[in-house]
Amino acid sequence: MAKNKLAKFAEMEVLKNVFQPKHKEIFRTDYFLKGHWREKIFQNNHPIVLEIGCGKGEYTVGLSELYPEKNFIGIDIKGARMWHGAKIALEKGLPNAVFLRIYAEMLESVFAPHEISEIWITFPDPQMAKARKRLTGSRFLNLYKKILIPNGHIHLKTDSPFLFAYTVALIGHNQLKAFICTEDLYRCEGQDKILGIQTFYEQQWLSRGKTIKYIQFALEGSDFIQEPDIELEKDDYHSEARYMNLSPKQ
């Protein structure tokens, strides 16, 4: 297993659709591609869509096939996983799909204001005990706001009742606009295109009867996103189902 990982890391260094900035290239400084992804990498003026926490890149690859008129960048810090998506994108000859190995906290060093049109967050760790690490928490939403175009859409797809309820509460607390909000994506009409893209783990969850939740929303309506004022009891961290009844404090 270790040798296999090392081989993937070595190949990642030479894959033409993979970018792995060194720490010194993005820490407290701007990456050389910031503001120039369209002209230097995609060589077009199409919208750029990010998948944050892309894992094996199923969504980056799948969406790039469905929407050739858009550019897609899969972002993750785990290179061995990302290798799969990068290889498949090359094998399929997808010029509109590339991969970027960075921590999500470094987005502002890599993308210019209004450079991104949409963000996908697919099955992230709910981070039940650490709001600062939630990819739909106020810390990250305020970061996304800096790089998204006005009214740029964010898509959350999750199997976690906790993360779904938390994100719904955050949207309500900040009076953000939600375009789609469903606790069962596979019963939601009009979403046929994205239903065809499934991660390995999503297929497993569906086979076990778990429902997939989906929210599409924008960050307009609040200058600074704030955490929802929600009562969390210590024991609730061990029971996601109880979060389906969360609501803001009165």
Image: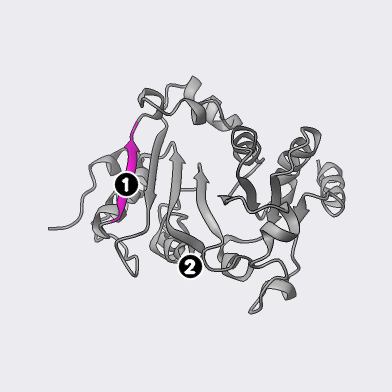
- Decide whether residue 113 is among the magenta residues: no
Q: Residue at x 57, y 60 (%)?
A: 104
Q: Could you tell me which residue is drawn at 24 percent across and 47 percent down?
A: 246
Residue 247, position in %: x, y? 21, 50
- In this rendering, position of residue 96 left or right of residue 151: right
Q: Seen from this angle, which residue lies furthest front?
A: 45
Number of marks in the image? 2
Q: Amino acid at mark 2?
A: Lys
Instruction: Identify the mark at residue 237; answer none if there is no mark.
Output: none
Q: Is residue 239 visible?
A: no
Which quadrant does the N terminus fall into?
top right
Determine whether 11 is above or below 200 in the image. Answer: below
Mark 2: secondary structure: helix
> From where the camera sits, is residue 22 visible?
yes
Residue at the bottom extreme, as displayed? 28
Give left or right: position of 59 versus 6: left
Between residues 207 and 170, which one lies in front from this camera angle? 170
Which residue appears at 63% of the width and 54% of the height? 45
Secondary structure mostly taken by the magenta-highlighted segment of the chain: strand
Q: Residue at x 27, y 51 (%)?
A: 169
Q: Amino acid at mark 1?
A: Ala
Q: Is residue 178 magenta?
A: yes
Q: Which residues are magenta?
A: 176-183
Q: x, y (%) of residue 94?
A: 73, 38
Image vertical order of residue 139 relative to residue 204, above or below: below
The x, y position of residue 192, in whole percent, is 46, 25
For mark 2, what is the residue?
Answer: 146
Q: Which mark is residue 178?
A: 1
- In this view, the residue in front, 52 or 234, is 52
Q: Is residue 38 left or right of residue 236?
A: right
- Classify mark 1: residues with Cα within 10 Å, few (<14), some (14-19) or many (20+): some
